[in-house]
Amino acid sequence: MAGQPIAPRRTAPHPGPEPEYGPLSRRYGSVVDHLYGVEVVVVDQDGSARVVVATREPDDPNHDLWWAHTGAGGGNFGVVTRYWLRSPDATGTDPAGLLPRAPRQLLECLVVWAWDEQMTERAFTTLLANFARWHECNSAPGSPAAGLYAVLEPAHRSAGSFQLVVQIDAGLPGADALVTDFVSAVTAGTGATQLLNGRRTMPWLHPTTWPGNGEPGDMITRRYKEKAGYLRRGFTATQLATIYQHLTNSTGGSTGGMLFVGYGGQVNTVPPQATAVAQRDAVMKAVFHTTWADEQDDAANLAWIRDFYRDVYRDTGGVPVPGGVSDGSYINYPDVDLADPAWNTSGVPWQTLYYKGNYPRLQQIKARWDPRNVFHHALAIDSSTG
């Protein structure tokens, strides 16, 4: 299977291209940047359903429906029954040449730290700051480091440890040295205990095809809450201290934590208005998460993660308001709290946090393709402008 065309998505299976990202996104862009067309079942004003094909061709009369599905299609306009993927610079009709080819081998590095006496607040916040600083300096489009994808996964202290995962195409020139330099940059000045610092090489498509569903938890533990934010640069010192406080408090559990996900690179070559994904100068994504098994633990887990997120973004009304550090949130991790004035006191509506200046166009498309508002949910596009 090596060498087959592949979209630059996560290594865990996940349905659809809604604005997906993964180990190849810094090198090749977001999945939606390779979306050529969609087949959608829509409902007209008279209540009848019909099938529509919409493509990125500028002269396609259904072009706006395609555009809406490059980052805002989830449950808003119709039922997608088919996707067509084709890179913008692809030529010809041979399917083997329509998408970037999958690397043959994946080089993966795993670093694990202990939550012990050496993982002080200074050591912990230094790790997070170093990770962010590297991405600030190495996420420009075309950067030699754009092929490196890393996820720092600070867990709550009750988990006992946390990890850094680094993935790169093993065939890239100097791949191993790039990983070494990256890990050195992240760990510099921390003095923290490493329980593991190992590497392995495997077929690139092995983790992609491994059974799973790409969601938090497992087959038993299916209660979870995620919250997210785009980062234009690393969190401030105050925010990093707040993260440490919440990951070492007595109310969090071993399944709670964060992800700092490397982003940027080729993703940021696309103008904000070219797709429905408006965040096109971020270098990382921050994900806050917790999972649990029993309904009786709902209140405690939701309280912990909501307080955590609110306190990190306390200076901007409890949410990642676009500015020097943040750039809104990621709709693939939908969070109804952003629409709740109890948790979003910023005065910035959830629509702006997710879609920024693209929301008015999405409203127009909603009015055209779902005039009866058949497809709606708590964070649905609202065609009304009042």
Image (cartoon, rainbow, N blue to C red):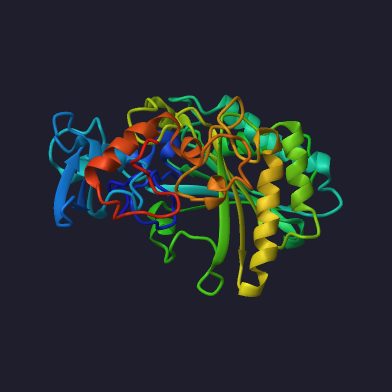
Q: Is residue 312 left or right of residue 209?
A: right
Q: Is residue 238 visible?
A: yes
Q: Is residue 354 above or below residue 215?
A: above
Q: Is residue 255 visible?
A: no
Q: Is residue 102 left or right of residue 369?
A: right
Residue furthest toward the right?
117
Occupied quadrant, residue 24: top left
Number of numbered tags placed on the structure image:
0
The residue nearer to you, when weighing 211 against 74, is: 74
Q: Position of residue 129 (x, y in %)?
A: 70, 34
Q: Position of residue 77 (x, y in %)?
A: 28, 48
Q: Is residue 149 left or right of residue 34?
A: right
Q: Position of residue 173 (x, y in %)?
A: 45, 33
The residue nearer to you, when weighing 83 against 277, is: 277
Occupied quadrant, residue 202: bottom left
Q: Position of residue 272 (x, y in %)?
A: 39, 27
